[in-house]
Amino acid sequence: MRPETREQYRIAVFALPATLFMLVMMAIPLGSVVWQSISDDTGLSLAAYAKIVQSNLFIRVTRTTLEIALGATLVAFFLGYPIAYFLAKQSTKRQTIWLIVILIPFWTSSLVKSFAFVVMLGHAGILNTFLGELGLGPYKMLFNRIGVMVGMSHFLVPFMVFPILTNLRSQPPELAKAAAIMGAGKFRIFRTVTFPLSLPGVVSGALLVFILALGFFIVPKLLGGRQDVMLSSLVDFYAREVFDFQMSSAIAVILMATALLAAFLLSKVRGGASILSKESS
Amino acid sequence: MMEGQGSTWRRANAAFAIAAMIFLLLPSLIVIPMSFSDSELIIFPPKGYSFHLYQRYVEEPGWVSASILSLRVAIWTTILSICLGVPAAYALVRGNFPGRRMLAMFLLSPIMLPSVVLALAIYIYFVRISLSHGELRLVLAHCVATLPFVVVTAAAGIQTVDANIERAATIMGASRLYVFRTVTLPLVIPSIVAGALFTFLISFDEIIISIFVAKAGDTTLPIKMFSSLVFEVSPVLAAISTMLTLMSALICILVTFAQKGDAKP
Amino acid sequence: MTDSMGTVQEMVRLDAVTKRYGSFTALHETELSIRAGEFLTLLGPSGSGKTTLLNAVAGMATPTSGRIWIDGRDVTATPPEKRGLGMVFQSYALMPHMTVFDNIAYPLKVRKISKQEIRKRVSDVLELVRLPDLAHRKPKELSGGQQQRVSIARCLVYNPRLVLMDEPLGALDKKLREQMQLEIKRLHNELKITMIYVTHDQEEALNMSDRIMLMNGGKAEQIGSPHDLYFRPVSQFAADFIGQSTMLDAKILEVGDPCIVDLGASGQCKVKVPGANKDQGGKLVLRPETLRLITNDQIADGFNALSVRYKDSLVTGSTIKHIVELENGTELIVQELTTPEETAKRHEGRLLVAWPVEAGIFLDR
Ligand SMILES: Nc1ncnc2c1ncn2[C@@H]1O[C@H](COP(=O)(O)OP(=O)(O)OP(=O)(O)O)[C@@H](O)[C@H]1O
Ligand SMILES: [Mg+2]
């Protein structure tokens, strides 16, 4: 064996334990889920998929999932972009402080946040009490679509902020300056220079948020109503309530395929995972 | 006039951004005053203040034992994922072997997979291989979710280490393992610590995978919180939420400032 | 260095070493032999393969084909940590988490040398590189020059017989660089090490080396002493890369000693071209400092002279550069020593540029 090849094997060995672990704990389980979904007692069978395609429940839940995921992506964009734009304009020191403001909710348990929203949005919750004093309401904001959207977009905004912020930070400041010298106003600079240049960041943020939104489970379960069941809950329902592993596996496979497709698109947008970019020397 | 337009635009943006950030921070903040309420009902703002919700957390059956289980699982998960993830990150960053890209994608893929899919897969797998040790089930399953995170954090750290420093050490006669131990590892310790803290947090807060793989008796804190939220919303949740929020905040601030200090020239 | 037999010992030998990256050849079948104690410089433009060659010797890049010997041992398949050589990097490559002392002690610890011995050798080598008082600082508390001294000390402390340096002074300012050149030269002489030194600064190469290997496009363009490279370049690339020169299109009219060479509209001149062929085309290389500006009555035997038009002068300290134009419009640079009279004298009248016949170099590639 060439010494260089031997050297490379010696480095690759460092990844061996993790690789074996992931093979045993992830690849095999996922593989058997796929297998489970296309087989039954008699052998290979696409019965589960046939059943799914004809199932009104599945079609309704898929539509709900897409609706909610798209809606949450949109809301996350409208909240996330201004935050990223605002942060990008701050000095590095202030940016750090503001980033903590985003990181703390980002790292707060989803159960804590769900609990807080239950308390805030409930029929006798904080928001309705407050609105009541203004002579408004009470409005139903919990256990329906509003609750789901609020909870999900709250969770997803940071995922939108980070890629956009990274993009905005990497934009050369001379561009905006040049536009300003040519007499463009602040809004015009934003509309004609900054925003178009930040689109790759927006797209990668939106794709990421969409992937995550597809798999949501806790928030719709705790803040949504019966009509807000998403695909994840359906997986859970078939697996742990009906014990129909074939059906739950088939839905999981569909969910996985969608996520992988979106992840593939994401890697195209980002031009590959950054972990692989090597500085040469 | 241009000035006026510019500053209006900037002020509008700042106002909206700050409002959005308050929205983000609000749930984490609102649980704190509620946790000190002296009422048995969940009301805001509380009429009077006391520690009795914290007292109930300690005294009511289940909460403390659930916390201890979560703690144990999180610690073991952190140790296991660091031991597996850091060397893997090293191989991915420094290696140039065929299949390196594929391997990176493979190791990072759980990030992109919905948790429910992983949870279902591992659940069915555990049933099939009849792994019955409850805590081990949780640790192994959590590790699948946290490992990619450790790999990414450690890889970012390793990338900041000048490869020539390792080369210099090699040429001076040190073996690869010795170089890793005496040069690379000490230089990436800050990112490993950051990765470990966040891994701990992810595992401690993990809910979806836990719901699937935990055995009936093994109630982690998130599982107990979840069932409390589904069946009857207990005010004790406010006390627990406050503690969890403070833990997250502490870790965030710690990591942010540790990295800041490190970046100084 | 000579061994007991009296023959010159060879420290490094490259035998048809080729390095390919995919379909790109970074190093073409390179042959090289380095004497023990020699100071060899690899000189060449960016991307010419200097680092590739150095890495092959160090063991950090395995040749695609060919063999490498160090000190009589075939090391082609030996990993870098077993080659026992020293290397200094442009980026210093000091371990930022270790003190100067620990950095220098690192190779000794690898070799499991006793604590006392380590302490003694580190302080000796710090003395040698003239940094005795900084042992307990961290690298980032040192200046660039000091850091490079530490990295040189770290490389010398375990007495490697062969030391490789890849643009060690590239990050330093001019003044410090000149000072460090002298230091490195001094260490080389005192310690009798064999040195392979990479630079793309021709002046540095000319100042320091016993021999220079000029590289171009992954190949050795010319190997020889600084004197050889300067006065006897084998190609237009070599002539152009080392020193200043003017190149004129030329064609051999008459073979002889010297040959008569046609310079087109500018006239003719005599050049010594061993093995010339009639009608052979090429370039005439003229070094600015071999040229003189004269007037008609100053033409002497053994000199070539061409008529020129004066354009401008640049005083650069001790020398003055005159820019003149040949009949066909080609510009020539004439470099002379500055004297008070000379600056003003030649604005009028017919001027000639003259050079000794043996100073012209005819190159056909
Ligand atoms: N790992 C690699 N993969 C592919 N090509 C490489 C690699 N390393 C070097 N090369 C190529 O080989 C050629 C020679 O590179 P090398 O580093 O030897 O140049 P150099 O003479 O040291 O240049 P410089 O003065 O810029 O350091 C370059 O064209 C470079 O792009
Ligand atoms: Mg180089």
Image (tube, rainbow, N blue to C red):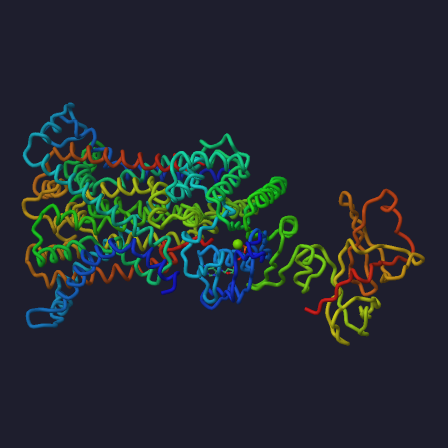
- The answer to which of A202 and B152 lies nearer the viewer is B152
In the image, residue B217 above or below residue B53:
below
The image position of residue C110, as x and y in percent, is 38, 44
Residue C104 occupies quadrant = top left
- The answer to which of A279 and C360 lies nearer the viewer is C360
Residue A125 occupies quadrant = top left
The image position of residue A86, as x and y in percent, is 40, 41
The image position of residue C311, as x and y in percent, is 82, 54
User: Residue visible at 34% across and 39% down?
Assistant: B190
> Which residue occupies the extreme front position in the image?
C5
* Quarter in which the C terminus of chain C is drawn: bottom right
- The answer to which of C203 and B138 lies nearer the viewer is C203
User: Residue visible at 38% across and 58% down?
Assistant: B96
Drawn side of residue A37 relative to residue C252, left or right = left
Drawn side of residue A245 relative to residue C333, left or right = left
In the image, residue A65 above or below residue B153:
below
The image position of residue B28, as x and y in percent, is 24, 36
Tally of numbered tags? 0
